[in-house]
Image (cartoon, rainbow, N blue to C red):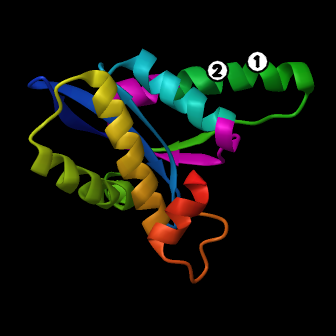
Amino acid sequence: MDETYLKVKGEDVYLYRAVDKFGKTIDFILTKKRDKKAALSFFTKAIDQHGLPEKVTMDKSGSNKAAIDYVNSFLVLLSVMLGKPFQILVRQIKYLNNIVESDHRPVKKICKGMMGFKAFHSAQATIAGIELHHMLKKGQHKNSNGVAIYEQFYALAG
C-alpha cells in the first residue's frame, strides 16, 4: 500500500492505494489529509471489502505504520478473546513497494493532463472512474477473458 498526492484547488490531497503482489488493484480512497485517521479509514475500507491480509508492504510513512499498528492491536485483543492468534505482518522495506509505486503512473499521467481539480467531490468521482478503467485494463473484471475494455464497461453499466 502507498499514497500519492493530487492537486485540488492548488492544494494537495492524498490518494491511498493498495495493490497485490500481482499488480491487481485491491482498493483506493481519496482523502484531504495524510494522517493516522486517513490511513486507518483506508485500511478499514480495504479490510471490510477484501478481508484481512497476511502481510502489508508500505514505505516508511509514520501515519500508515501507526494505522496498521492500531489494527494489529485490535487484532491482538480479538485473538485473546477467540483464542486464535492473528497479526498482520508489516514490511517497511524500501524496494518492495515498487509495484504500487509504478501503478500510480497511469493515474498520475491522466490527472497531470487535467492540471488539477476544482472540487474535492469531483476529484473523487473522476479518480473512481480512472481507477475503474485502470482495473478493467488490467483484466480485473471477473468476465474479462478476451473481452475488449469498452465491452466490459458497457456490461458493468448495463
Locate residue 40 relative to residue 144 in the image: left or right.
Answer: left
For marks 1 and 2, give the CA distance.
Answer: 7 Å
Q: In the rendered structure, which segment of residues is drawn in magenta? A: 49-67
Residue neighbourhood size for the residue with mark 1, other residues' Cα within 10 Å, grouped as few (<14), some (14–19), many (≥20): few
Q: Is residue 52 magenta?
A: yes
Secondary structure under the numbered disc 1 in the rendered image: helix
Q: Amino acid at mark 1?
A: Leu
Locate residue 79 relative to residue 101 in the image: left or right: right
Quarter of the image with the C terminus in it: bottom right
Residue 9, image x, y percentages = 12, 23
Label 2 sits on a secondary structure element that is helix
Q: Is 58 one of the magenta-colored residues?
A: yes
Q: Residue at x 54, y 31 (%)?
A: 43
Q: Quadrant of the N terminus?
A: top left
Residue sitting at x 44%, y 26%: 39
Eyeballing the image, is 102 above or below 77?
below
Q: Residue at x 36, y 32 (%)?
A: 124
Residue 118 lies, with reference to residue 52, above or below; the image says: above
Q: Is residue 101 left or right of residue 36?
A: left
Contact between marks 1 and 2 (CB within 8 A): the answer is yes
Tag 1 residue: 77
Name the residue that disc number 2 marks. 73
